[in-house]
Image (spheres, grey):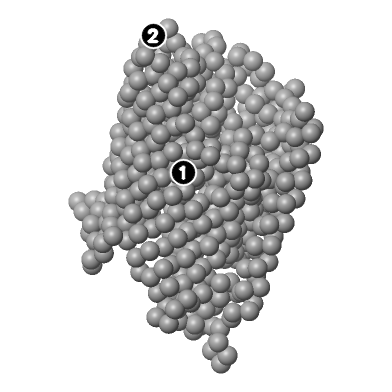
Amino acid sequence: MLRARRHGSTLAARRARALLAMGIAIATTLGCATGAPPGEEPGAAVVVPSYRKLRYDEDYSYLKDPSKRSDFWDPIKYIRLNESGDRYLSFGGEGRWRYEYYRNYQWDPASPFNGGYLLQRYLLHADLHVGPRVRLFGQLQASLEDGREGGPRPTDEDELDVHQLFTDVRAWTEADDSLLLRVGRQEMLYGSQRLVSVRESPNIRRSFDAARVLGRFGDWHADVFFSKPVENEPGAFDDGRSDEMFWGVYTTHPLGCVKGANADLYFLGLDRPGAEFVQGTGDERRQSLGARLFGGAGAWDYNFEGVYQFGSFAGGGIRAWTLATDTGFTLSSVRFAPRLGLKADVISGDGSAADATLGTFNPLFPRGAYFGEIALIGPENLIDLHPSIEVHVSEAVTLTLDCDFFWRYSTGDGIYNNGGGVIRGADGNARYIGTQPSIGVEWEAGRHTTFNVVYAHFFAGDYIRESGPGADVDFLAAWIVYRF
């Protein structure tokens, strides 16, 4: 049965590759065919914007002036559709090729998921601006997996689907104030992505079917939303909405009383039927009230966040919380300008499965590699200490060395993966989970291309050895990303 499914998957994957390759070829052809007008050379002094985490946040209206074109892809980043230039079409995309290798996956020498495999992700988007008030954005995603023993994980394979398709209507704009309505399938990202992220490291990025009101009032930014997460399926054009409901308000404002400081305040709600924790399975209605302080002062940078959660689970109450810090100091006068960093997290777990109150923190929709690319452990029931050093070997090459130390917050609870699934239960009284050193190199080969290599080793602690297979884990990942 699995072999038959994989054969069908391979055929559909070929079609997905062909469609995405065709789209990129068309974009390339347009780029070559619609260059700067004769006699006009690309401007040498143009400041080219960086690609954004949310591609729909990119603004290429400055390319209305042909003299500002300085990149091969600029002709398809701004295609004029009317004489005034306020109606235009923009294309973009990304290809990512990632190799991963695990030895003793989830600490188990007999795991069927040991070994190496290739992940591919292709994204192609179109951004249509119909005047200054209306805009339509659409994006296709193909995520493919090859060679993984035991088959793809839920976030590995989605052969071809509509990843984003939304409309923006700018209801009001005046000086520094504006009000925007955004409706449709879209990516969402808030703050430092502890609770809501695009899930960049896994092969399938995350999106939501959402209605949002985005307001800017002077220095205040506010986002009110109601959404349902998209449920990824492995086939072509078969993604649907999950049974979960997710809503909230997220605001950001600079702190005038502290130079260089900014604050986020937010309220998030989640309804999730059939939620699973070590305590059991049941319907979850959870609200999260949080605050974040972040910024920089001289050589220091900081990011502090606290969240309190309450609500109901399987007829009982919810009382959970987390405190997280990320502080860094950059030695700019020293060769290679090293940044010394220290992260620390305290994340609540359940005190006892026997009582009705659930104390396990729910990270909602966090980064897919919350504690490093090895991605063995998710942010529930943990105490985490994470020193690091980041060295800029050159303007293009960054070397990162770090080491993560993990403990269970509560021995009455287990550990979870990045998707919130239970890995191991409340076994024994040991707290120490393990030590995870890693080394990573990133090379920005140009504006479009980056290369990354990461190696991590997880030394199993007392809890891992006592609760089941307890072998150390080796992990290697290498990937290339090309964006345009």
Q: Which percent across, then down, holds residue 324?
A: 39, 35
**Does 332 sit above or below residue 319?**
below
**In the rendered image, is residue 288 in sight?**
yes
Q: Quadrant of residue 226?
A: top left
Q: Which of these two is toward me, 52 or 385?
A: 52
* First in residue order: circle 1 vs circle 2: 1
Q: CA distance from mark 1 to mark 2?
A: 34 Å
Q: Quadrant of residue 94?
A: bottom right
Q: Quadrant of residue 323?
A: top left
The answer to whether residue 325 is left or right of residue 70 is left
Q: Which percent across, then down, holds residue 357?
A: 36, 14
**Label placed on residue 355:** 2
The answer to whether residue 289 is left or right of residue 64 is left
Q: Which of these two is toward me, 429 or 164?
A: 164
Question: Which residue is found at the position 58% from the left and 53% from the top?
Answer: 140
- Residue marked by disc 1: 208
**In the rendered image, is residue 254 in sight?**
no
